[in-house]
Image (cartoon, helix red, strand yellow):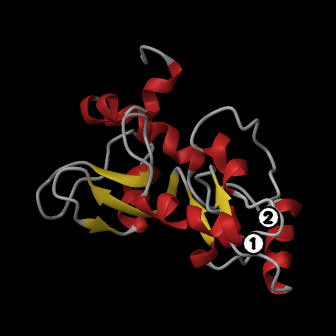
Amino acid sequence: NLPHPEAVFEIGYFKRKPQAFYMLAKELFPGNFKPTPTHHFMNLLHQKGLLLRCFTQNIDSLEAQAGLPKDLVVAAHGNFDSAHCIKCRKEHTLEHVRKAVDKGKGEPAHCTRCGGLVKPDIVFFGENLPERFFERLKDLQQADLLIILGTSLVVQPFASLIDRVSSR
């Protein structure tokens, strides 16, 4: 029983009731979805030497599945590529999380070091965006072209990406 739909992605709620996220995670987990033609288009741009960076708000890692090297992707809201204990920050494999998710009972993965909750490295409400997002913003100054797809550009900081491209 969620107090509101967004609670499943709130860090405070996750700390109190991680079962809600772990039940939903089975649906969101990598492997459940396939890259779209747009993901393959991004990889084509890379193969032709035309892609400097791919900023995404998606957490599904479909860019990597389409063949885009991970170093070119800036996952502003994180993704399922890695996981950490929210207490001691020990890194855990995605397989560790998958085992808990696949049980289908909502029981969370626990840290092998301290017993804390393990969370995939997706950004929940109440958490900061990854440092990499802010570090790579400088790339936009080098861009000859900025392609915006699948977003209304209403929510910050993504809404301001267009302001960072140089008007040469």
Mark drawn on residue 39: 2
- Mark 2 secondary-structure assignment: helix
Looking at the image, which residue is at 25% across and 29% down? 16
From the image, tell me which residue sits under label 1.
66
Q: Residue furthest left?
A: 114
Q: In the rendered structure, which amino acid carries the disc numbered 1?
A: Ala
Is residue 9 or residue 149 the one in the foreground? 149
Density class for disc 1 (Cα within 10 Å; few <14, some 14-19, many ≥20) is some
Q: Residue at x 22, y 65 (%)?
A: 90
Residue 18 x %, y %: 33, 36
Q: Secondary structure at mark 1?
A: loop
Q: Earlier in the sequence, mark 1 or mark 2?
A: 2
Residue 33, image x and y in percent?
71, 56
Picture coordinates of residue 13 (x, y %)?
A: 33, 28
Q: Quadrant of the C terminus?
A: bottom right
Q: Nearer the viewer, residue 144 or 25?
A: 144
> Looking at this view, is 66 or 141 the one in front?
141
| 124 lies left or right of 11 | right
Residue 80 in sight:
no
Above or below for 157 versus 139 = above
